[in-house]
Amino acid sequence: MNNFLAQHPINTTIPVAWGEMDALQHVNNAVYFKYFETARLDFFNQINLLADLKTTGVGPVLSETNARFKRPLTFPDTIIVGTKISDITEDRFVMHYTVFSQAQQAVTTIGWAKVVMFNVKTGQKAKLTPQLLDALSKHQ
């Protein structure tokens, strides 16, 4: 686990809930996108991305997301979702998620999402601010 944490300095710890399991007794595939969302918002809060959303109307939206399941998760467990950034352009970037099971001491799932900056006031894509570009670049 120490190696995982060293490779993923931005990470989010999430307990697996009993109700997230399906009839096959493992975490349902749709739940992983909730895990990714939790990690994404935690990351955004850590870099203050959402701080100006109310005043500027500019925030992140998903344009695409994906998950690859390597091992099933079950209750009880606690996962750590590591987050990294790549493919930064003027108006978008890609977030990569790696899910580590503390019970299994293994990576169970990997995923990614394309995130586009969007201005809700104009209904148009928006550019990354210099501050956001700098914050994202530190986590490539």
Image: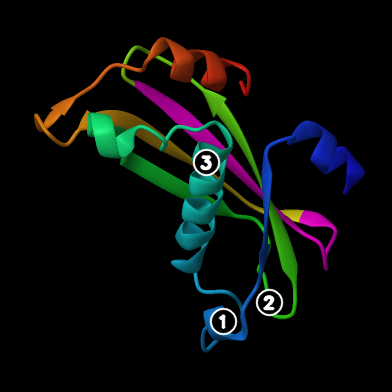
- Please tell me whether mark 2 sits on a helix, a strand or a loop: loop
In the picture of the structure, the residue carrying the numbered disc 1 is 21
The reply to whether discs 1 and 3 touch (Cβ–Cβ < 8 Å) is: no
**Residue 97 x %, y %:** 58, 43
Could you tell me the amino acid type at mark 3? Asn
Q: Is residue 121 left or right of residue 15?
A: left
Q: CA distance from mark 3 to mark 2?
A: 28 Å
20 vs 85: above or below: below
Could you tell me the amino acid type at mark 2? Thr
Residue occupying the point 51% across, 52% down: 36
Q: Residue furthest bottom?
A: 23
Camera-nearest residue between 92 and 119: 119
Residue occupying the point 55% across, 36% down: 96
Q: Residues within 10 Å of mark 3 (few under 14, many from 20)?
A: few
Q: Earlier in the sequence, mark 3 or mark 2?
A: 3
Q: Residues within 10 Å of mark 2 (few under 14, many from 20)?
A: many
- Please tell me whether mark 1 sits on a helix, a strand or a loop: loop
41 vs 44: above or below: below
What are the residue bounds of the magenta stretch? 92-106
Of the 4 image quadrants, the one containing the C terminus is top right
Residue occupying the point 81% across, 42% down: 4
Camera-nearest residue between 42 and 77: 42
Q: Nearer the viewer, mark 1 or mark 3?
A: 3
Q: Is residue 113 left or right of residue 137?
A: left
Could you tell me the amino acid type at mark 1? Met
Magenta span includes 29: no
**Residue 125 x %, y %:** 19, 25
In the picture of the structure, the residue carrying the numbered disc 2 is 74
Magenta span includes 104: yes
Q: Which mark is residue 45?
A: 3
